[in-house]
Amino acid sequence: MSTAGRAAAHEDGELERLRTELRDLRARARVRPLISQAQGIVQERYALPDGESAFALMQRASQRYNIKLRTLAGVLVTAPRPDGPETLWFPRRVRTPEPELTFTRAHRSGAGSRGAVLKAVLSSTLAVVGTDMGNVQLSDPARGGLSIERHTGLTADFVDFFAHVGEEGTSCARAARDGAQITVRDVESDPVFTEPARQAILAAGSRGCHSVPLTTASGLCVGMVSAHVDRPLDPLTTAQTKALDTLGSQAGRWLAWHDRTVVLDALEHLHTLGRAGRGTSFRRS
């Protein structure tokens, strides 16, 4: 390689390093304020001496129930306060059986944790549409909108740009608002996208996409799974649409169950730890 070629390669490598660093900074900036807010609530509620102790309690609850710390924090900052310092946090909640997920049978990892279920949701959707690019988003209780939870085949820039989306400007936002599947045949010309969103999708190699709401029994959209293809996408067949409807309703019901059972168990555990160790220092594991 010539001197000029080596210099150009070095510049390209340095540019990519800086872009990666910037994406990482943005990812931390999206999560850190939420974690800090949750720490403040926990520290105040249990008279803890410092934020480190509050973080340690959150970490213990997160690890015990196998949920992400930011998931726990998002629910913690939006949940109503416990009735009193010596009571259960959710004394009147009713437990229901875990909903059945038929689509996980084709995926050995698709049972148990939320991450495993989301992996199965994405794999099943991509198999129906016939592609290897896609992502799963979940409703964000703290900020509203949708946040990416799982993805495959998409560029780092795509994931960074669409890490959180609001209620307008994307096909997934429209599908969430309407509570119905939506097919975008041609990303380049479809008016559903804002121009920055369109360019970000095209840059990732997607030319068409299909979004499926994950809905509860009452029709509430709690998430979205989207498949992207590298060509204009024709409308799906009736059989494909029906299969994705079933997947979306089963996944939505399971996610709602997980939120009101496993996530609330984690908050209850946090509350128990906080009450027992009121005013005590804790250290993260």
Image (spheres, rainbow, N blue to C red):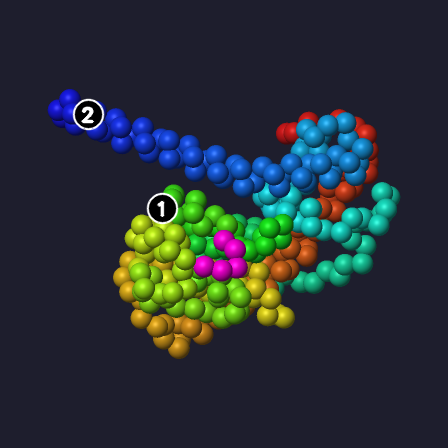
Which residue is depicted at the point 23% across and 29% down? 9
Provide the secondary structure element on which disc 1 rests: loop
Mark 1, residue position: 155
Residue shown at 86% from the left, 43% from the top = 86
**Badge 1, how many Cα within 10 Å: few under 14, some, many 20+?**
some
> Could you say which quadrant of the image residue 232 lies in?
bottom left
Q: Which mark is residue 6?
A: 2
Toward the top, the furthest residue is 3
Q: Position of residue 148 (x, y in %)?
A: 49, 50
Element marked by disc 2 = helix
**Nearer to me, 105 or 166:** 166
The residue furthest front is 195
Q: Looking at this view, is 143 or 99 the one in front?
A: 143
Where on the picture, by quarter, is residue 257? bottom right
Left or right relative to 208: residue 100: right
- In the image, the segment drawn in magenta is 165-169
Q: Amino acid at mark 2?
A: Arg
Q: Assign the magenta stretch its main secondary structure.
A: loop
The answer to whether residue 117 is visible is no
Viewer can see residue 257? yes
Horizontal and vertical percent for residue 133? 36, 55
Rendered position, 145 above or below 268: below
